[in-house]
Image: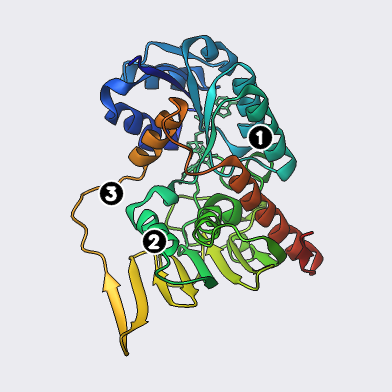
Amino acid sequence: MEKLRVGIIGVGGIAVSRHIPSFLALGNDVEVTAVCDVNAERAETVAQDYQIPFHTNEYTEIFDHVDAVTICTPNKFHADIAIAALQAGKHVLCEKPMAMSTEECEAMIQAADAAGKILMIAYHYRHTKEARAAKRFIDGGEIGRPLVSRAQAIRRRKVPGWGVFTNKDLQGGGSLIDFGCHFLDLALHLMDFPEIAEVSGATYNELSRQNDIVNQWGTFDPATFEVDDHATAYIKFKDGATLLFETSWAANLADDQETVSVSGTKGGLDVYPLKLYQAKYGMLLDQEAYWISDDENPGIPQAINFVESCRGNQQPLVKPQEALIVSKVIEAIYESSETGQAVRFS
Ligand SMILES: NC(=O)c1ccc[n+]([C@@H]2O[C@H](COP(=O)([O-])OP(=O)(O)OC[C@H]3O[C@@H](n4cnc5c(N)ncnc54)[C@H](O)[C@@H]3O)[C@@H](O)[C@H]2O)c1
C-alpha cells in the first residue's frame, strides 16, 4: 500500500500539538511530506523539528508534494485554501469552525463535490471514546428518541490571550465560534441532526471589556476586545426536541465544565464523563463506563478516519454538510443576539 502524503497548512498551535503527532503516530500508512506557513521561519522550524522534506510560505506550492492537506490557519482562510486544495485534486481535513459563514461552507462543499475528494472537518470531540460510545448507545435505542439535549462548554477566565483568537476579522467571533462550536456539533450529532425550527441566542463580552481583567490564559487588551466571551442559545427542532446551549471563555463560574447530556423517551446520558441513565425492571439504573483502553487522544482516531476516508475505506465521521449546519446555528445565534429576535429556519 502506498503511503498517503499529507501536507499541513498553518503550522501553529493545533498543527504541532495535534495533527502532526497524530499523523506520525499512524506509522507507515502516512507520511507528512510538506508544511506551509505564511511565517516562513515557522514553516522551516517545524519542517526541521519533524524532518518534513518540503516547506514553503505559499500554500499553493505544497500541492505538488501531497495527496491531502490539513488546514490549520485562522478561520478567515479556511474556505479559500480548502477550495484551492480541492480544485488541485487534494483531500482536505479542515480545522473547525468549517469557515466564517454559511456561504463559504457551501462553496467548500461544492468544490468537494466537483472534485470528488474528501472534505472533513476537525470537530474532534466526536472522536473521543465517550462521544463514540454515547452515539452507539443512542443508535442502539438505549435512550429512545432524544427529546432534550444540553450542551455546556464553560471555562473560567480563560480567554486565549495568544494568537488571533480575539480578532473578529480573522476568526469571525469568540467563545461561540471557537469553543462552543464543538459542543453544538456534538449535541447535534448525538441527536442525529434533527431539522431545526428556530434559534434564539444571546452573546456577551462585558466581562472581558473591563479594565481590571483577571485571565488564566495570557493577556489581551480589554479596550479592543471585540468578540463574544459568553453565549447562550435555545434551539427548537421541527420534531419537538430542544437543545439548551451555553458556552464561555471567561465565565464567573466553576472552571472547565464540558458536557453534553441527552434525555430521551426511554433513558438519557451524559457524555463527559459517560453515564447512562435508565428506568428498567421497576428500578432506576445508572451505568458508568469501565474503560479498558488508554485511547485518550482523539487526534489519532480523527487522523485514522481521515486517512481511511481518503483511501476509500471509511466515511468521514464529520461530514461537511453537518459542519455547515453547525455554522448555520452559530450564525443564527449571532443574528438573534443582534436583533433580539428568534431566527426561524425554513
Ligand atoms: N480542534 C480544536 O480543538 C482546535 C484548537 C485550537 C485551534 N483550532 C483551530 O485551528 C486553527 C488554527 O488555530 P491555532 O491555535 O493553531 O492558531 P495559531 O495562531 O497557533 O496558528 C495558526 C498558524 O497559521 C499561520 N497562517 C496564518 N495565515 C496563513 C495562511 N494564509 N497560510 C498559511 N499559514 C497561515 C500562522 O502564521 C500560524 O502559524 C483555527 O481555525 C482554530 O479554530 C482548533
Q: Looking at the rendering, which quadrant does residue 192 occupy?
A: bottom right
Q: Residue at x 39, y 56 (%)?
A: 131
Name the element at disc 1.
helix
Q: How much space separates mark 2 and mark 3, taking CA atoms?
A: 16 Å
Quick one: 151 or 269, which is closer to the camera?
269
Q: Earlier in the sequence, mark 1 or mark 3?
A: 1
Point out which mark residue 274 bears: none
Residue placed furthest toward the left: 292
Residue 26 is left or right of residue 18, and the answer is left
Name the element at disc 2.
helix
The residue pinned by badge 2 equals 134
| Contact, mark 2 vs mark 3 (Cβ under 8 Å) | no
Whether label 1 lies within 8 Å of ligand 1 gets the answer no
> Looking at the picture, does residue 284 appear above or below residue 50?
below
In the rendered image, residue 116, in percent from the top left (x then y), is placed at: 60, 25
Residue 26 visible to an observer of this rendering: yes
Which mark is nearer the camera, 1 or 3?
1
Q: Which quarter of the rendering shows the N terminus? A: top left
In the rendered image, residue 114, in percent from the top left (x then y), is placed at: 67, 25
The residue pinned by badge 3 equals 296
Q: Residue at x 63, y 31 (%)?
A: 77
The residue pinned by badge 1 equals 109
Q: Earlier in the sequence, mark 2 or mark 1?
A: 1
Three-letter code, disc 1: Ile
| Contact, mark 2 vs mark 1 (Cβ under 8 Å) | no
